Image (cartoon, grey):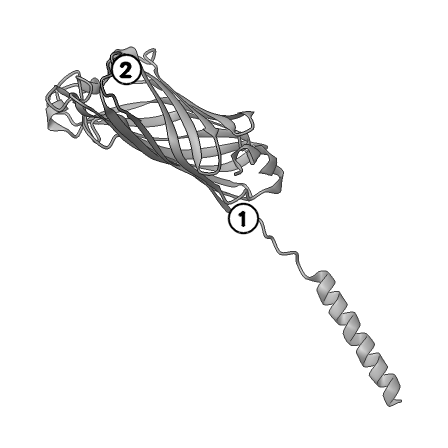
Amino acid sequence: MKKILLSFSISLGAFLFAQEKSEAPAIDTTKAWSIQGQNTLMLNQAAFSNWVGGGANNVGWLAGVNYNLTYEKGKDLWENIIILGYGQNNTKGVGTRKTQDVINLSTNYGREFAKHWYISAGASLQTQFAAGYEDGNNPEAAKISNFMAPGYLNLGAGVTYRPNDNFTMTLRPANARWTFVLDDDLQYAGTYGLKNDGDSSLFQFGFLGTAIYKVKIMENINLINTGSVFSNYLDHPERLVLSYSGVLNMKINKFISTNVTLDLLYDHNQIQKTQLKQTLGVGFAYNFDNGRKRSENKENQSWLKK
């Protein structure tokens, strides 16, 4: 009898253990946060001695970071972008001039209401680190810009379309835009659209559209396109503020790459001409990617993998 009871107890225990094991909920190992980014340090140098063709000794550098922090869980999507860059070039007989100067921060939160579509709201800030001058950033020339002069703050709500990790488009029919000019020397009428001498800011309200499109051209050659358009409902809505930024990254190995950038801007309140900036650099670049949260999106980021 004891043997029968012992056998029954062992069998019952094994059965209950198997039931508990089979009914245990699966552990969700997907990540809510992902971080992608690139740290760069580009160097350039030229030296001449008795060179009949002429030339001036020069040395330059450019440093920057570009981070994309994304939270994605359920119907929630929160994307954050940090772009910082600064560079200088020192040429014999000319002095030091800056070649790159950018601060670009943005955040956008969305709640999915249809496949790939999100009701969203967000903010962005664009400015620069240091003063800029009329004559090639010569400190003895007239100053035309500075930190938060101008500075652009956008705050708005709309919809975001994000079918995959390579394309994101945000449309905000309700967007407040503040232009800040916090340098006293630049606070006079007409500068950056300011209405009166001594004004430190300009308020605009209108439509803002932004898009990011990432393209893998070939192995280790990638292009990131960023564009935006703004129309001010309150004053001359036909005067669109248009901008485009292209970054071509050609990776040599894990730590060395070549970057080519092209920036185009048209803003009637700055100058009534198209502005262009282009840079080329070869140097150290470290890319990192801690992986995506959702396995179905992983193939869309293969071009960023090291």
Q: Is residue 18 left or right of residue 203?
A: right
Look at the image and tell me whether residue 79 can be seen. Answer: no
Q: What amino acid does circle 1 point to?
A: Lys
| Residue for point 39% across, 36% down | 284
Is 232 or 9 nearer to us in this picture?
9
Residue 106 in percent (x, y) is at 37, 34
Q: Position of residue 269 (x, y in %)?
A: 24, 16
> In which quarter of the view is residue 200 placed?
top left
Numbered circle sitting on residue 31: 1
Tell me where residue 98 appears, x and y as whole percent.
Answer: 23, 26
**Would you name the residue on which mark 2 appears?**
235
Separation of residues labelled 1 and 2 (CA atoms): 45 Å
State the count of labels.
2
Left or right of 248? Residue 62 is left
Residue beneath the point at 79% across and 70% down? 15
Asked which quadrant contains residue 59, the reply is top left
Q: Residues within 10 Å of mark 2 (few under 14, many from 20)?
A: few
Estimate the x, y position of residue 72 in percent, counting from the top left: 51, 42
- Name which residue type carries label 2: Asp
Name the foreground residue: 164 vs 301.
301
Position of 63 relative to 56 (above/below):
below
Residue 180 lies, with reference to residue 266, above or below; the image says below
Please, what secondary structure does the residue beneath circle 2 have?
loop
Residue at 26% x, 24% y is: 47
Mark 1 vs mark 2, foreground winner is 1
- Badge 1: residue crowd in 10 Å (few <14, some 14–19, many ≥20): some
